[in-house]
Image: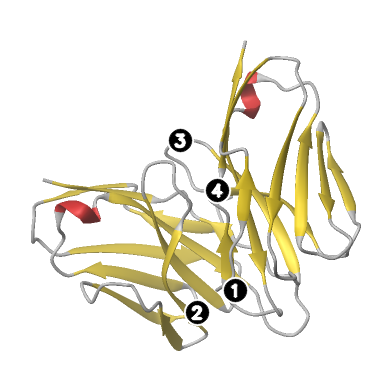
Amino acid sequence: DAMVIQNPRYQVTQFGKPVTLSCSQTLNHNVMYWYQQKSSQAPKLLFHYYDKDFNNEADTPDNFQSRRPNTSFCFLDIRSPGLGDAAMYLCATSRVGGRFTGELFFGEGSRLTVL
Amino acid sequence: TQLLEQSPQFLSIQEGENLTVYCNSSSVFSSLQWYRQEPGEGPVLLVTVVTGGEVKKLKRLTFQFGDARKDSSLHITAAQPGDTGLYLCAGLYNYGQNFVFGPGTRLSVLP
């Protein structure tokens, strides 16, 4: 059974039309991440939540926002998508802290197309 | 800035050949993971290594963590077309929250 579920798998939007991508997890992990991945490149971290604490990467555009209403769910909001935002968006979870080794568990991704 | 390098970045081989992919950093990891990603899918965790010098085997895949915990290798024996994909290494520093990814190795195994 899938442990990190992303919806939708495919999202097509128009230039400037807001988009929300969702992620849910059944692992009860304390950290949830959003990554952006463009064709065959490594995933690029946008931001992450450690419990309720939001951690933004310095180079993440203001156009990208996130919400984590509870442990299980996390959302990625793209307020005004541009053509350059077309990418695969990956949600991942991890249990970190203490002496846990820490591994990332990824969802299947949401592929965003901007017309 | 913590960086991870991977080599080679692209590799195309014939079915049955062996290969090794390398992941290197100048920093010490608390743990390192290898992932495989197929087109249109999210990365899937293959292995986590934690102890310097550790060797883990997963069927035809052998993972090694360097003694100093700064580098790792992935060796595939008798590669098969099903091994085709993007192989990513990722490191965790100081038992923190942020994972650093290498640029990936795109492997193509031809039948």
User: The residue under label 1 is which amino acid type?
Assistant: Asn
Q: Amino acid at mark 4?
A: Pro
Q: Do tag 1 and tag 2 residues touch (Cβ < 8 Å)?
A: yes
Q: Nearer the viewer, residue A64 or B108?
A: B108
Q: CA distance from mark 1 to mark 2?
A: 7 Å
Query: Residue B65 at what x, y percent from top left?
Result: 83, 55
Nearer to us in this view, B59 or B75: B75
Q: Which mark is residue A71?
A: 2
Q: Secondary structure at mark 3?
A: loop
Mark nearer the viewer, 1 or 3: 3
- Distance, label 2 to label 3, CA atoms, is 29 Å
Task: Label 1: state its secondary structure.
Answer: loop
Could you tell whether A55 is left or right of A98 in the image? left
Q: Nearer the viewer, mark 2 or mark 4?
A: 4
Q: Of the numbered discs in the image, which one, if any, rests on residue B39?
A: 3
Label 2 in the same subunit as label 3: no
What residue is pinned by disc 1?
A28
Q: Taking B50 as reference, is B56 above or below it?
A: above
Q: Earlier in the sequence, mark 1 or mark 2?
A: 1
Which chain hosts label 4?
Answer: B
- Residue A91, given in percent of the width and then of the height, sits at 45, 61
Q: Look at the image and tell me whether residue B83 can be seen.
A: yes
**Which residue bears the numbered disc 4?**
B43
Rounded to the nearest angstrom, the CA distance separating label 1 from label 3 is: 28 Å
Q: Are marks 1 and 2 on the same chain?
A: yes
